[in-house]
Amino acid sequence: QVQLVESGGGVVQPGGSLRLSCAASGFTFSSYGMHWVRQAPGKELEWVSFLRFDGSNKNYADSVKGRFTISRDNSKNTLFLQMNSLRVEDTAVYYCAKDLDWQLLVFDYWGQGTLVTVSS
Amino acid sequence: DIQMTQSPSSLSASVGNRVTITCRASQDISNSLAWYQLKPGKAPKLLIYATSTLQSGVPSRFSGSRSGTDFTLTISSLQPEDVATYYCHKYNVVPLTFGGGTKVEIK
């Protein structure tokens, strides 16, 4: 069965960096687009970034553009999110999500999330 | 950016009752609308995509429909396990956006 397991969350000071990872199993990782979605405490879901199955197309929300970088290692079935210049408003649970297809932009499987707290 | 306005923000209904949640898009998004169910401590779950296509394994009491830029998620007979927060999601173009969520409780 499909499994997505996020890791790398934690507490970081404003201006700091974190790298999130998402280990995927149960499907052919290299054939599907992948996303990061976040939910701040008490807030609605917010899409963060998308990466095409082959890494050739990346998209970002305006709120993270220029600060976050999405990448993947298809040989290790792993998705990454490098987060730099973190702000208090980046505090959220970050979910890794699999695309329903190579680029349909629908999330058919999600991980359980990893908490990122940006605080001084 | 296209905004998704979801209503109500919360509702309480009895077991067996019909429940309806609505999302209104600020522009035409064709049928590019999905619905998700979120429960605390669990991975979010895709219920419906392409407005009305039921994801595999989702009970048939869930259904979706569209009238213009208004989209509806219906639970035909509310069950205790349906207690959750539901979100609509538009995906015709980036940026992908969600509605504000609807918290569903049992009366």
Image (cartoon, rainbow, N blue to C red):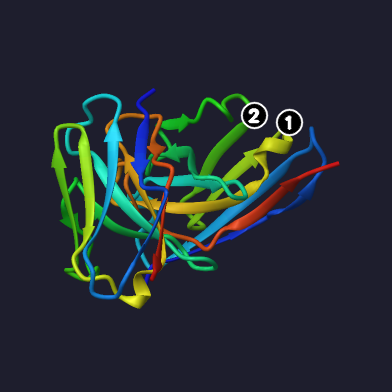
Residue hosting label 1: A85
Q: Quadrant of the C terminus of chain A?
A: top right
- Give the Cα distance between marks 2 and 1: 6 Å
Q: Residue at x 62, y 50 (%)?
A: A41
- Residue A118 quadrant: top right
Task: Please report, as a chain letter, where disc 2 is located.
Answer: A
Q: Quadrant of the N terminus of chain A?
A: bottom left
Given the image, on which type of amino acid does mark 2 rest? Answer: Arg
Q: Secondary structure at mark 2?
A: loop
x and y, in percent, of residue B11 in the image: 38, 57
How many C-alpha atoms fall within 10 Å of the one at disc 2: few (<14), some, or many (≥20)?
Answer: some
User: Residue A67 bears which disc, if any?
Assistant: 2
Residue closest to the eye, A4 or B41: B41
Are circles 2 and 1 on residues that touch, CB within 8 Å? Answer: yes
Please state the total of marks drawn on the protein image. Answer: 2
x and y, in percent, of residue A30 in the image: 38, 51
- Residue A15 quadrant: top right
Residue closest to the eye, B52 or B84: B84
Given the image, on which type of amino acid does mark 1 rest? Answer: Ser
